[in-house]
């Protein structure tokens, strides 16, 4: 077994089919031309990558590549095998007999807290991911006292400005809040070990945050970089500084938003907690992936303030592929979570005791079914609560098992026959 980067293959003998198998990981980060020497050495090829992660950065522009390809008689191959706009992943997909239909998707997700991966599952991966992280795995008690589980946000009504040399972008107010938050995090009760990352789309902001962190000891605990620096990496806590705010050019804001890969990488590097620190009001108004992220986190923050168990249930519903509304007003009433699926309307409320104020009757008059759930049912048997939601929506509850870790599947199977014993 030889392990190498694409740039270090010169130490391997240039022999055709020297290896039975060549495996290329992070293939969206690789250009085909960089990998040709390794592909030449293999009998078979496995290409692993995620097109929703960051693409490769080409070292040759289209303006340089076109005349070269014409000079050497390979112009007709540029679209399929050229350097400028192709990755190994994209080229490999086009070479499969049925193209994208032949791609095997790795759907199981082990890394992130449900509220973190729930956003990307809903808005990036078309609700195809299956959570395989045991929900009973909780934060170190010290870390739990420092950061909210999953996602959270801090609103900074700052403004964006150009970096040095009128290049890149920065947001000083945002950077100062990031540094203050980080210092409070490191001054609190420390867990045995945890890792921190600060990710931002702009190099000028990265440099500003580094300058503000004047203590050399602080730097030892964290990594600061753009999303490209975190590709394929992960941290227990990720702080996301988007910079976008009044003062930034529309083109630069659009660069953050499209394609959505940058936001996806920034979010999914976090294992336990992802903190969005920025101009939330500005971001929320954006009709784009970053606007969806700000609204998603804002909704969860409101849920946390009203009911922690509803926030926990929201995470599982999102992972199932449902897109519940938060605190929707129905007539004169407010329902914690509402679902509208295939013509059926369902209001799910986490309550400590059964309501006898006519709440269910009023919602029924407006076309809503209701499900009242005790907080302990969400904490102790979330699989059973999901099963009851599916039954209310007239879904096959067995389809829920696809999203549950093995421990919860067993609980769901055992509890299916004893649903009446849970007081809901």
Image: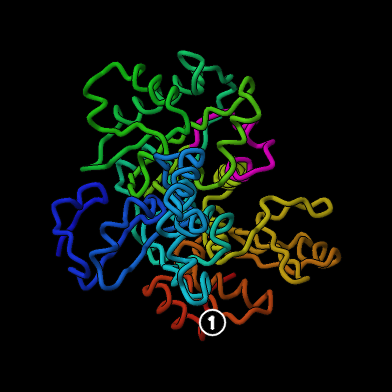
- Which residue is nearer to you in this view: 396 or 249? 249
Q: Quadrant of the C terminus?
A: bottom right
Task: Tell me if residue 355 comes above or below residue 251 in the rendering.
Answer: below
Note whether 152 is above or below 341 in the view shown: above
Looking at the rendering, which quadrant does residue 42 occupy? bottom left
> In this orientation, does residue 54 appear?
no
What percent of the width, then of the height, locates residue 63? 51, 38
The span shown in magenta is 276-293
Residue 199: image location, x then y, percent: 41, 35
**Residue occupying image coordinates x 78% and y 66%:** 368
The single residue placed furthest to the bottom in the displayed view is: 417
Q: Which quarter of the figure has residue 305?
A: top right
Secondary structure of the residue carrying numbered label 1: helix
The residue pinned by badge 1 equals 398
Residue at the outermost right position: 365
Residue 407: horizontal and vertical position, in percent? 37, 73
- Which residue is rendered at x = 58% and y = 62% of the image? 126
Front residue of 214 and 155: 214
Instruction: Indicate the position of residue 389 as horizontal and vertical percent values.
Output: 62, 71
| Residue at left offset 15%, top offset 60% | 2
Q: Residue at x 50, y 45 (%)?
A: 66
Residue 315 drawn in magenta: no
Q: Check disc 1: other Cα within 10 Å, few if <14, some if 14-19, many if 20+.
A: few
């Amino acid at each position: 077994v030889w392990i190498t980067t694409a740039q270090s293959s010169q130490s391997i003998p240039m022999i055709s089919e020297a290896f039975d198998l060549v495996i290329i990981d992070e293939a969206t980060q690789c250009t085909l031309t960089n990998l040709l020497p390794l592909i030449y050495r293999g009998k078979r090829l496995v290409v692993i990558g995620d097109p929703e992660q960051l693409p490769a950065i080409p070292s040759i522009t289209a303006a340089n590549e076109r005349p070269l390809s014409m000079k050497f008689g390979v112009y007709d191959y540029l679209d399929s095998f050229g350097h400028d706009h192709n990755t190994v992943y994209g080229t490999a997909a086009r070479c499969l007999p049925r193209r994208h239909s032949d791609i095997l998707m790795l759907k199981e997700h082990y890394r992130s807290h449900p509220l973190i991966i729930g956003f990307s599952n809903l808005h990036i991966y078309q609700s195809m991911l299956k959570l395989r992280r045991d929900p009973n795995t909780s934060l170190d008690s010290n870390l739990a006292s420092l950061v909210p589980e999953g996602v959270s946000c801090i609103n900074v009504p700052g403004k964006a400005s150009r970096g040095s040399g009128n290049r890149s972008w920065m947001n000083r107010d945002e950077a100062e809040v990031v540094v203050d938050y980080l210092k409070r995090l490191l001054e609190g009760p420390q867990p045995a070990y945890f890792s921190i990352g600060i990710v931002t789309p702009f190099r000028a902001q990265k440099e500003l945050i580094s300058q503000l962190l004047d203590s050399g000891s602080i730097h030892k605990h964290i990594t600061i970089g753009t999303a490209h620096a975190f590709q394929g990496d992960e941290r227990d806590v990720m702080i996301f500084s988007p910079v976008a705010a009044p003062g930034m050019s529309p083109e630069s804001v659009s660069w953050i938003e499209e394609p959505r890969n940058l936001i996806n990488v920034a979010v999914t590097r976090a294992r336990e907690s992802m903190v969005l620190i920025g101009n939330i009001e500005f971001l929320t108004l954006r009709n784009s992936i970053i606007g969806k992220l700000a609204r998603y986190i804002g909704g969860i923050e409101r849920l946390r303030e009203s009911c922690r168990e509803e926030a926990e249930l929201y995470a599982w519903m999102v992972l199932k592929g449902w897109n519940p509304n938060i605190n929707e007003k129905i007539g004169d009433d407010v329902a914690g979570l509402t679902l509208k699926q295939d013509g059926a309307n369902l209001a799910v409320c986490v309550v400590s005791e059964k309501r006898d104020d006519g709440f269910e009757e009023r919602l029924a008059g407006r076309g809503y079914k209701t499900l009242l759930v005790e907080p302990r049912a969400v904490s102790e048997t979330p699989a059973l609560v999901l099963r009851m939601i599916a039954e209310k929506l007239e879904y096959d509850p067995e389809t829920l098992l696809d999203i549950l870790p093995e421990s919860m599947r067993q609980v769901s199977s055992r509890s299916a026959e004893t649903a009446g014993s849970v007081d809901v």
